[in-house]
Image (spheres, rainbow, N blue to C red):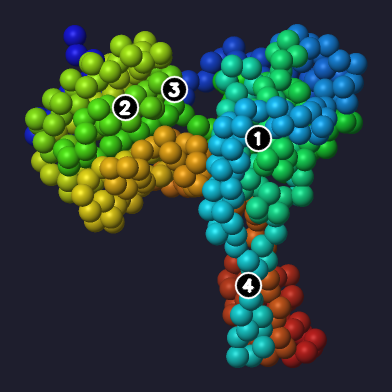
Amino acid sequence: MSLINRLDTRSDDFRTRLHALLAFEASEDASIERAVADILLDVRTRGDGAVLEYTHRFDRVQAASIRELDIPRADWAAALEALPREQRAALEAAADRIRSYHERQRTETWTYTEPDGTVLGQKVTPLDRVGLYVPGGKAAYPSSLLMNAIPAKVAGVGEVVMVTPTPDGVRNPMVLAAAAIAGVDRAIAIGGAQAVGALAYGTPSIAPVDKIVGPGNAYVAAAKRRVYGTVGIDMIAGPSEILVICDGNTPADWIAMDLFSQAEHDELAQAILLCPDAGYIAQVEAAIARLLPTMPRAQIIRTSLANRGALILVRDLEEACAIANDIAPEHLEISTAEPERWADLIRHAGAIFMGTHSSESLGDYCAGPNHVLPTSRTARFSSPLGVYDFQKRSSLIKVSGAGARTLGRVAATLAHGEGLQAHARSAEYRLDDGSAS
């Protein structure tokens, strides 16, 4: 049995087989949805008491108040100091690169003045308060904390509140160290749907936030979906994806391991190679077979590649780029000579890695751009998480007297046409310095 699907764009059934591999719909488990709805209603109704009860039930942590679940800043600093030197240096280097990249995304307020003195523009302001969900226990990802918290602080968010579950009271030291490095303002040892509800609705001890970001399990994702509208959210992410366009000149082992790097996330992750060289595809397939037994997460990778992975023979690199645009992948590696040439043809991708040395794994940790990326073909209309997700824009309108006379006639005509007479009269009052027309 083949470890990974083999497709050829020349085959009559290529499109059908490709779309079958791409098909993924996030299933909404009815029992999860009911449980989350009940938890959110309870938190909205009973506040702190509900959060404490669910924290005891799900994380086996007993506390008499939310304040007892606050993780003191001194503990973050202690965790940072206690980290092995190499781990601390790596976290700090990643944070510096992430901060440097995102500082270039800041948008400033701007205005312009028209000949009649009317001033128009845009005012950019940060969100006041952001909630950051950080998985705890074995699924702790300090890199995700950096990717979410640093853009928020660069944007000027006044308060970043981190919530993280601590099953049986166990706190992840790298997460706490990353919180200290990223400039998080408050950390609370709570998780699950109850934490999302507390951030969205507020409780006597937790002020409501304006937006909730960060990854979580199915319950957290369902809760974020339900509170959207009360607060903003970053996205509902699907399984991880990598698409590699290769001209056949990169070592086959490198490409096989790049495919593994996403397949090891979970069984639903997707890893695809597009290449015009059939002989090279055979080399990659052989590398997959040889390297897979050496992987600690071999069974997850095996399932992912068998169910959703593919090695696709294309006619040429132009066709590969066209297929990439159709797939709109989360991560796109262009492992070719002159990668910029092919990147110019790409319209839809979360992150584009150009050249043989640009492995996707570097983007996950320390290249600088954000690793929170659109999945499940949503790169067709959405973007990586960035500073702009923590800022909002207000329109600025200062109309001069001369401008009011010009614009008033236009507005009044349109308002009369829509049957909105008060709109029209409001504009007409200003046609002649306060005299009604």
Give above or below for 79 relative to 112: above
Name the spot of residue 254 as percent of width and height, x first: 28, 31
On residue 257, the disc is 2
Other residues around mark 3 within 10 Å, as few (<14) / some (14–19) / many (≥20) = some
Under tag 2, what secondary structure? helix
Name the spot of residue 30 as percent of width and height, x first: 56, 15
Residue in view at x 32 percent, y 42 percent: 357
Amino acid at circle 4: Trp
Q: Quadrant of residue 325?
A: top left
Name the spot of residue 302 as percent of width and height, x first: 32, 14
Under tag 1, what secondary structure? helix
Image marks 2 and 3: residues in contact by CB distance under 8 Å: no
Give the residue number, with chain letter if any, for mark 1. 178
Q: Earlier in the sequence, mark 2 or mark 3?
A: 2
Give above or below for 356 relative to 421: above
Name the spot of residue 118 as percent of width and height, x first: 66, 84
Give above or below for 280 relative to 296: below
Give the residue number, with chain letter if any, for mark 3. 265
